[in-house]
Amino acid sequence: MIKLNKSKIPKILIDKGIPENNKNCLDYDEFPDNFKTGEQKFKFKNKIYADKTTIKEQLKTDQNNKCAYCETKYELMFGDGDVEHFRPKGSYKQERDEKLNYPGYYWLAYNWNNLLFSCERCNRKHKGNLFPIKKGTKRIANHKSLKLENNEDVLLVNPYFDEPDEHLGFNKNIVYGKTEKGKKTIEVLGLNKPELQEKRREYLKLFQDNFSTVSNNIFKNKSLISKTPVVVYKALKKEITKSEKNIKAFKSDKGQYQLMIKSYLKTK
């Protein structure tokens, strides 16, 4: 997970999202008890908040075609990926084994700052409706308590508004939490599940191999032994340039698992 930046809010969320949000808030005001028990539920329109040609594509562009959480590239994901609500829109859980609590953060269903692009593994298999906050702190109950939003002590790293490297670190391909928030994020998103560890291990090995490419290619080329220093220097420079390009691609934010790569480089 790396720091991300939000682009300009898509027009569809202004033209269609705001009216839908206003309607939901009015509905809640009319029947608050029904929504609190889950007897009455909001009907969210995914054709607005997850519009493929605007919302989803813009989020993918903002995130370099990667999952906001695990940094897996879109083309390597299982499925088409999801437009995910950081704060769950319909209902929420503090812990995985507890029942659903109603309502969710319904007033943020069409809020650009609450939307991310996520792989189905992170969103559906792991995070789902989980949204833990620090025990003993207050959760925002409804749209009337919006002032609490910035004071909610959330135990989940948001790459758009947090600095992920303050909460998460890597020992090779294994992610660890530097803070309580980081540790809970790893648990909620399953960031140390075996299949994800293996993907990161393979990617790290590819990156490490680029460091040894220069010396290996030079020493394997026995014909250079009899060459002049100038010829050897040119061959070495060519290999270094090629390796630098490869390493630069690995280090780019467009590459996978950048927090892991940057953590690895700090040890070198």
Image (cartoon, rainbow, N blue to C red):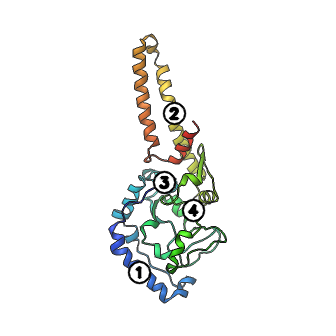
Mark 1 and mark 2 in contact? Answer it, CB < 8 Å.
no
The three-letter code of the residue at mark 1 reads: Asn
The residue under the point 42% across, 51% down is 75
Q: Nearer the viewer, mark 4 or mark 3?
A: 3
| Label 1 secondary element | helix
**Is 115 situated left or right of 93 in this image?**
left
Residue 257 visible from this viewpoint = no
- The tag on residue 22 is 1
The three-letter code of the residue at mark 2 reads: Asp
- The tag on residue 203 is none
The residue under the point 41% across, 60% down is 6
Compared to residue 14, the image places residue 224 above or below, namely above
Compared to residue 47, the image places residue 247 above or below, namely above
**Residue 189 point in image, percent of width and height:** 57, 59
Q: Nearer the viewer, mark 1 or mark 2?
A: 1
- In the rendered image, which quarter is residue 33 located in? bottom right
Please rate how many residues cluster around mark 3, counting C-alpha atoms within 10 Å: few if below 14, some from 14 to 19, many from 20: some
The residue at which mark 4 appears reads as 156
Sequence order check: which comes first, mark 4 or mark 2? Answer: 4
**Residue 238 point in image, percent of width and height:** 40, 25
Residue 248 visible from this viewpoint = yes
The residue at which mark 2 appears reads as 209
| Label 4 secondary element | loop
